[in-house]
Amino acid sequence: MLGWLAAIALAAGAAPEPPASVCASALDALPAQPFIVKAGKNSSTEFVLDTHGRCLHVDDHDEPALLIRLEPSAQPMNVKVISVSGKESTLPARIVLLDEHFGEVRSYPFERFVKRGMNYSTTVFLEPATTVRYLLARPDHEWVGKQNQLTQGNRWTAFWATPTVMGTISNGNEVKRSVPFTVFGTVRLELEEETRLIDPAKR
């Protein structure tokens, strides 16, 4: 039926209506994925933004988006957010903390992330009385299209000994390459083992 209507509109000289977006049009329409904190254990969960994941329709375009539900805790928590570098690309994540009504509490643009090894990470502090209930991860478009410089190395160490002397011999090599920052990638959330009270105004 829709196809016939479009054909009639074209014959009449009218432009057909653009197809409706299949992405969520509002934050509360995004399905929230849980970040499960296991008592007495280091919690770590990976979430993937890809073409088959969830998406959000904003500013007349669609983009990957992850809504992660954070359970309330009686203890302060330091949650490390890691943007994992892949072999072909890296996601420059922008993190937004939301309250139960999806209002913004704090945001962390990708410039707040620090490169550690091949990955990028930042830490968010959640106090027991926090109103934060969700973490939203989206691409930071200020970084999309730029290049991420990666350095990979292989190193080996051999042990040697004589009846009177012992020692080691080490050698290795480094390979440098660049991959683009794109809208797709992996975000890992880790609950840091040691939590300490940090002034939220400084985070």
Image (tube, rainbow, N blue to C red):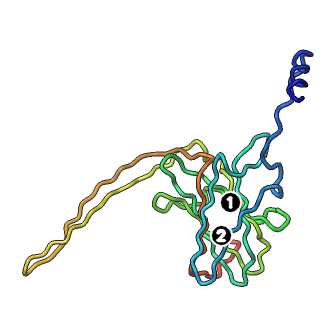
Can you tell which quarter of the image residue 70 is in? bottom right
Label 2: few (<14), some or many (≥20) within 10 Å? some
Question: What percent of the width, then of the height, locates residue 57?
Answer: 78, 46
Question: What percent of the width, then of the height, locates residue 15?
Answer: 86, 23
Residue type at mark 1 is Ile
Q: In the orientation shown, which residue stands out farthest toward the left?
A: 163
Above or below residue 14? Residue 18 is: below
Label 1: few (<14), some or many (≥20) within 10 Å? many
Residue at the spot 62% in from the left edge and 55% down from the top edge: 48
SS at circle 2:
strand
Residue type at mark 2 is Val
Query: Mark 2 near mark 1, Cβ–Cβ under 8 Å?
Result: yes
- Tell me the residue that label 2 is attached to: 124
Q: Which tag, 2 or 1, sits closer to the chain's start?
A: 1
- Tell me the residue that label 1 is attached to: 95
Above or below residue 27? Residue 57 is: above
Question: What percent of the width, then of the height, locates residue 47?
Answer: 63, 60
Above or below residue 125? Residue 56 is: above
The numbered mark at residue 39 is: none
Q: Please give left or right for residue 49 compared with residue 21 in the image.
A: left
